[in-house]
Image: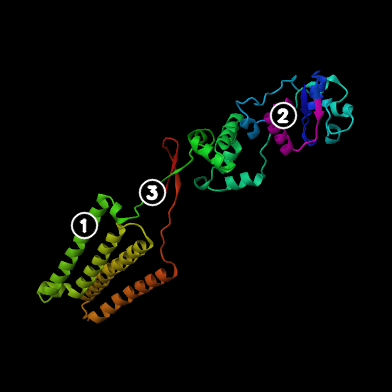
Amino acid sequence: TGILIGCPCEWTMDAEAQVFWNNITGLEYTNNYTPDQLKQIWHAASYTKNHVIMCWFFPDPLIELYHATDYEFKGIAFPPADLECLSNKPNNEKKRCSENQTERVGTSDRAKCESSLQILKRVWVKSLQDDSLRVEPVDQSPAYEIMRSLEISNIDLKDIMRQHLRQADTTPRDAVCNWIVKNYEDLVQNYFPKGYPREVQTLFVENYNDLPWYTIFAQFIATIVFILTIITLILVWKYRLTKAMVFAQPIFLYLILAGFSLQTIASFFDAYPLSSFTCTAKSVFFLLGKTQELIPIIVKTSAINMLHNAAKQKRRLNINPRKLMIKVAVVVAFVLGVLILWVAIDPQTVVFTRYLTNTFSIDNDGIHH
């Protein structure tokens, strides 16, 4: 004897038809309760020690709440469902909650099988896949692949619910998050696509203290060369009145050595950690130094060729050193102006390029940039 609590009318379960056609007698039938009322009925039956048969679903926290107690939920095994049985069951809400018992249980004893399970499905718009695959592989998120492969078993749900019930001060969200932390390694192995989570490996140095030894050694060499260039410049000025220096034209030597010193400064910045300033400084000093080094040589070589050709033609040629310096100054000023405009309009910035490697760590795909 006991009470048979029917399901809410909108549920597709048919407890009364199953009990009726399987000849389970001695039960008082009542139905059309809300899910919250069904929970209260089970709590009351547990408190008053009354016998109750009630339709419910699995997994659910209510089942876990009474796990390993006197009122633990026990499933009733009915004959397996088939198409013939399901076609004889009351198949709409009106029949399941009719005042007429015949409409509630049906007219055939073939309606005694268990209820058909409704498989939950994941549904999302196709644009989710399209948007995911449209991104470059290096920037693709694993979200779509995880959603496509994600499955949580009933055992996992039971574990989450029991953890939530044991800790009354936690929310369902906390229980899920704690379960994910606890089972993180399994989740990564089972659900994360190969190569996720990705490990970022940086191929450039951000801080000066992290520079490798050979880069610091290169800066040391650049400093030594710069000092030697300055010393050479001083010696040229000191011996500028000697015959060899007079023929070599000290002003041209000054310009060439100054250009060479600018290139050593560019080399120093080239070995410095990347930044917008170092990139700009390296380019400016190198181009300006190369211009100041080559243009005086070109101008002087041109003047020497002019003298040589004049000597072949047996004619006098006067070369004004001031005009030669003006030529050098015009070219250097032009290059300097172009560099100033370049820095003002389109300054150099550090751009990092990321790419996927073919090497894997234990379970990660490295991204180098």
Cα distance between the residues tagged 2 and 3: 52 Å
Does residue 90 appear to the left or right of 281 in the view shown? right
Q: Is residue 153 magenta?
A: no
Residue 7 vs residue 296: left or right?
A: right
Whether residue 60 is visible: no
Circle 3 packing at 10 Å, graded few (<14), some (14-19), many (20+), is few
Q: Residue at x 21, y 68 (%)?
A: 257
Check if residue 36 falls in the magenta segment.
yes
Q: Residue furthest left?
A: 242
Nearest to the eye among marks 2 and 1: give it. Answer: 2
Kind of residue indicated by mark 2: Leu
From the viewer's side, name the closer residue of 156 and 326.
Answer: 156
Label 1: which residue?
Answer: 221
Image quarter (top left, top right, bottom left or bottom right) of the N terminus: top right
Mark 3: amino acid: Thr
SS at badge 1: helix
Q: Nearer the viewer, mark 1 or mark 3?
A: 3
Q: Locate residue 121: give its quadrant.
A: top right
Say which label, 2 or 3, has the lower sequence index: 2
Residue at mark 1 to residue at mark 3: CA–CA distance:
26 Å
SS category of the residue bearing label 2: loop
- Magenta residues span 28-54
Q: Eyeballing the image, is 97 above or below 68?
A: below
Of labels 2 and 1, earlier in sequence is 2
Residue 288 vs residue 347, the one in the foreground: 347
Where is mark 2, residue-wise? 117
Between discs 1 and 3, the one toward the N terminus: 3
Asked whether the beta carbons under mark 1 and mark 3 sit within 8 Å of each other, the answer is no
Which amino acid lies under the numbered mark 1 shown in the image of this protein?
Answer: Ile
Task: Give the image location of residue 223, x and y in percent.
Answer: 21, 61
Give the distance between the C-alpha atoms of the residues marked 2 and 1, in whole angstroms: 78 Å
Q: Which residue is mark 3?
A: 202
